[in-house]
Image (tube, grey):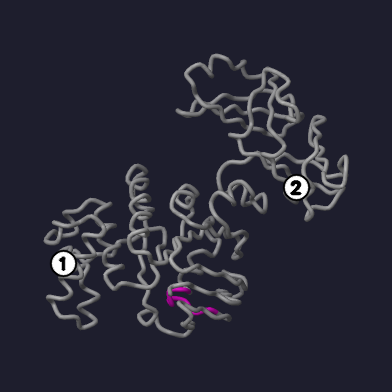
Amino acid sequence: MSSVELRGIAKSFGSAPAVHPLDFSVRDGEFLSILGPSGSGKTTLLRMIAGFEQPDKGTISIGGREVSRLSPDRRNLGVVFQSYALFPHMTVLDNVGFGLRMRGIMKRNRNTRAAEALALVGLSGFEGRLPRQLSGGQQQRVALARAIVFEPDVLLLDEPLGALDLKLRKRMQLELKQLHRTLRRTFIYVTHDQEEALTMSDRVAVMDGGRVLQVDTPEAIYHNPSSSFVAEFLGESNLIPGTVCGGRNSETTRFKGPAGMHFDLPRIGRIEADVPALLSVRPERVIISETDGEAGTVIFAATLEAVVFKGAWISVVARIGSGTRCEALISNDGRAMLKLPAPGQVVRMAFRPQDARLLEGTP
């Protein structure tokens, strides 16, 4: 068992709350990412789980055992930071086995375990090298091997790929996911990078201002964000301001947006009628329409502002009415750019009501 349970956990530094009281669970064997901007409290939360910070109140349990007041070395956790912190004068094998040496493990045994950990991260044959003889990605693998050599119940990772270039970072994301499948351990991964969270996670916890705003699978959070912050932070989203009012029947809600936009959606119980609301629509769900579209499709006029080439996609940015921004992402078939009008002209944009989500609040 390597589940993690947080109950009423909170932490302040002086008078400034870093993590507001929260209840939080990580399932046995899952890969959970804690995603949020700088200062959201995600690293403080991870450090409390690790034992590097003591919570002001609340309890932390790992595998059903409360560890709130235990020192980090008694929690059976592996920890990987962005900084590799390798000993420059030690070989790769000795770096990985150093913690075992401090625990009194005999040399033959620790060398065997260190070599096995290196094999798991794809570094067999590198045992005799020094850190300066390794690339950044290889050094990060050594740091991973050092963390898993203890066979920890939970692996904590705090922005471990932040120092790598984009191409290597993408490759390491897939390798970390594969390592998780191989080890079948619980991984808790802190990041500000939305793509990392979407690529690797079984579930994502979105944090802001010391609070966990939503916890769910990447697909569920992406398609059903709980707030405008989540919608914008996890990917791109069009947020169209408007008002919610009564629909045609008891099962629908009518949304009235800018420039005469109005249509019915399935009723959302948590949003009251006659109050400001936001409509969230992902850019890839918006199209440029040359016809009246399918029955029930929401079609509206907008003034084309910019067309941006993005390789496999083309971004079409327009303004609805006096200024609401709306973006459509169009698949680049090699001819799409030629079909678009020039900036300043009016285009017809469209989306399906089922691809939109109503959110509380104003921009």
Asked whether residue 124 is drawn in magenta, I would say no
How far is the residue under mark 1 from the one under mark 2? 56 Å
Residue 67 position, x and y percent, is 46, 82
Determine crowd level at label 2: few under 14, some 14-19, many 20+ residues with C-alpha closer than 10 A: some
1 or 2: tag closer to the N-terminus: 1
The stretch of residues the image draws in magenta is 49-55
Asked whether residue 54 is drawn in magenta, I would say yes
User: Circle 2 sits in a helix, a strand or a loop, which is it?
Assistant: loop
Q: The residue under label 1 is which amino acid type?
A: Met
Question: Residue tagged by mark 1?
Answer: 90
Identity of the residue drawn at 20% across and 65% down: 116
Most distant residue in the bottom direction: 69
Q: Is residue 356 left or right of residue 191?
A: right
Residue 52 position, x and y percent, is 43, 76
Question: Image quarter for residue 289?
Answer: top right
Q: Is residue 120 above or below residue 28?
A: above
Question: Residue tagged by mark 2?
Answer: 362
- Please name whichever residue, 27 or 164, is drawn nearer the observer in this view of the structure: 27
